[in-house]
Image (tube, grey):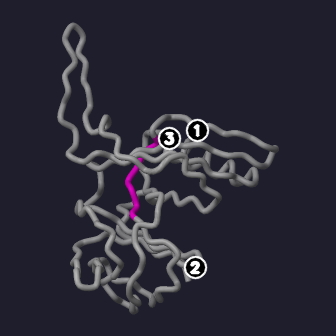
Amino acid sequence: MADDLLDLGGISLYFPDKLVDWKEAPMADFDLARKINEFKGSSQQIDYYSDEAPRKQNFSVTLLSQVEIYSILDFFLVNMRGRHKKFWFPLAFQAFQLAAFISLGSTKITVFENKLDWRGYERLILVLRNGDKISRKITDFTRFEETGTIEFEVTAIGREIQIADVVLITFLLLCRLDQDSMRLQYFTTDVATAELAMVELPNEYPS
């Protein structure tokens, strides 16, 4: 079939299909939950910025051709203009395991419990064995303690999905690059790794 990417608010999705080496586990960076304004001739003033501590991810991706090298440079440095534009990026780990078959037109996704901390703006992405990606905003959820599952309410899904069809279910984070640069390390003229750091934007999620 094809990708079915909804509820992204017209914001680009970057999903690394190549070999990814996570430099560190995703972390909440509490320093970025406040911003500091400093005025000439006065002491620093700390302004309230966000209730949510943004998650930060550092990773490198292995690129195996000049085309792949150009593609990642084009996306982050040309299209996103470094830190200027935001984009969707998957959380670095498997957040859930599908617990039940998804029927055609279903508005429910049932997964095994993972101690979800509900924030009200999460987007899920499902990656299927055939490579297709499906994104949806979570509009509500119900916990079933007796079965240890969570049932998500989402926009209708236009295909049947078996449990065995799904290789990844995780959250999409709304991010920007953490700096206006990218480090490329070349091994040959066609093989390189790109190192990136990105930070979540918890107060900028579209409704």
Which range is magenta? Answer: 171-177
Residue found at the far front of this picture: 146
Dot in front, 2 or 3: 2
User: Does 150 sit left or right of 69 as displayed?
Assistant: left
Q: Quadrant of residue 148?
A: bottom left
**Number of the front mark, 1 or 2:** 2
Quadrant where the image shows the N terminus? bottom right
In front: mark 3 or mark 1? 1
Viewer-proximal residue, 21 or 4?
21
Q: Residue at x 69, y 54 (%)?
A: 68
Secondary structure mainly formed by the magenta segment: strand
Secondary structure under tag 3 reads loop
Comes first in the chain, label 3 or label 1? 3
Mark before the other along the chain sequence, 1 or 2: 2
Q: Mark 2 points at which residue?
A: 129
Q: Please, is residue 197 above or below residue 131 in the view? A: above
Q: What residue type is labelled 2?
A: Arg
Q: Nearer the viewer, residue 125 or 112?
A: 112
Answer yes or no: is residue 142 visible: yes
Local SS, label 1:
loop
- Which residue matches tag 1? 182
State how far apart marks 2 and 3 are (Cα). Answer: 32 Å
Q: Report the quarter where the C terminus lies.
A: bottom left
Report the Cα–Cα distance between label 1 and label 2.
31 Å
Mark 2: which secondary structure? loop
Q: In the image, is residue 75 part of the stretch drawn in magenta?
A: no
Q: Name the residue under label 3.
A: 81
| Residue depicted at 32% across the width and 69% down the height | 137
Q: In this view, does 151 lie above or below 72?
A: below
Which residue type does callout 1 highlight? Met
Circle 2 crowding by C-alpha within 10 Å: few under 14, some 14–19, many from 20 = few
Residue beneath the point at 54% across and 76% down = 132
